[in-house]
Every structure is written in C-alpha cells, then in structure tokens.
Image (spheres, rainbow, N blue to C red):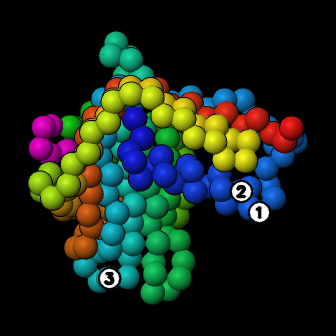
Amino acid sequence: MTSMLTRNAHRILAVTMCVSGITGAAFAEPPTKVKGNGGYLAASGYDTSGCIWSYVYAGRGGTTAAPQTWMNYDVYDVCAGQWLASGWGIIPNTALKIGNKTATLVLTPSASANFSVQGETGPIQIKVTADGLFSYSYSGHTRSEYAGHVYQSHGSWTERSATVTGTVVGFAQGGMRGSLGEGRDRYMEFDRGSN
C-alpha cells in the first residue's frame, strides 16, 4: 500500500544503515509485513510563508471486513532549523476519504494507544486533487536486496499526481504537491543480519 515515495524511502534507509555500519546479526529483526487494501494519499511541500515544510501520508490497509487506516506526518521549520511536529499510527477510517479524482484527510491528531504525537498539535485538513500531470500503475512482483535487507512485494497499485490545499497542524499549505491512488498488495521486509 505504500506509495513509490515511501517504498524508496525504505530502500534509502536500508542503504544508509548499511553504510553507517548499523546492520548486523545483533540487529536482525522479525519480518515486517504490510498489506495494502485500499486508497492512499501523500502530500509534501511548504506552507504559504515558505518556511514550514510538511509531509503527510495516510492509507488504508487490513481486510475488506476489518479495514485499518494508518497515517504519519512531519512538520519542520526550515528557517529556524527545527522539527515542529510529528505523528504516526492508526487513525479512524472515517478520517480518510478516497474518490476517483480527489482524496481528503480530516482530523486533529492526538496521542492514544494506537497513535503517537510529538511537538505541536492542531488540525490536519488536506484535499488532494488529481491534476493529470503524472500517473503510474504497477502489477506483479518486486524484490530488492541491500546488505542483508530483503524487500518483496506482490499485487497492484496506482498513483496519480495531485494538487494540494488545506492545513497541516494549522499551517496553511501554499506550495505542496501530492499524489493519490490505490494499493492492493502485500509488502514484506526481512533483515537477514550478517552471514
């Protein structure tokens, strides 16, 4: 269910960890599994001041009978050089609405057993609208391996570029770009440790 941007971020993180010498037998972990089963949206960019950069991702997973919506966000003040807010975890399914050409995310994140919040709080109200500039679809299997980390996925997903309007933790968005789509896939990450 992760977007191409999120999948690439996982791969970059794995390479960074390898180069930094962090990976090894002592750090081998159980496989990470994610199942995509619905729509998602992603948005990143600057607010109207040009100082506040934000990233927001929300997507549906789980089964058709028992869907779960997962979200993460980060807000960073580039001008001051400091993180302002971040959060990640499970949110109410009703907060994310996905249509054919638009998607909306509306909620005010708060700490709970299923959601972690750090820094400033405030409403997140994002609308992404497909703009026709870019689209991507994929169906099949993928596998990549980086220094003991193996990534595999199977299924299909689509992604379309989009314009973004709204607010992130109360900051009005003026220079964000986004994407929306749908994923029906299974994604697994294995850490083999050193041989």
- Residue topped by disc 1: 20
Say which of 159 and 171 sits in front. 159
Q: Amino acid at mark 2?
A: Met
Q: Secondary structure at mark 1?
A: loop
Number of numbered discs on residues? 3
Q: Could you say where residue 110 lies in the image, as x and y percent from the top left?
A: 45, 48
Reading the image, the residue beneath label 3 is 50
Mark 1 and mark 2: Cα distance apart in space: 5 Å
The numbered mark at residue 7 is: none
| Residue type, label 1 | Ser
State yes or no: discs 1 and 2 in contact (Cβ < 8 Å).
Answer: yes
Query: In the figure, residue 45 lies in which quadrant?
Result: bottom left
Label 2 close to label 3 by CB (< 8 Å)? no
Q: Which residues are magenta?
A: 99-103
Does dot 2 land on a helix, a strand or a loop?
helix
- Classify mark 3: residues with Cα within 10 Å, few (<14), some (14-19) or many (20+): some
Residue 24 point in image, percent of width and height: 84, 46
**Amino acid of disc 3:** Gly
* Res. 17 mark: 2
168 versus 36 height, above or below: below
Residue 81 vertical position relative to residue 113 in the rendered view, above or below: below
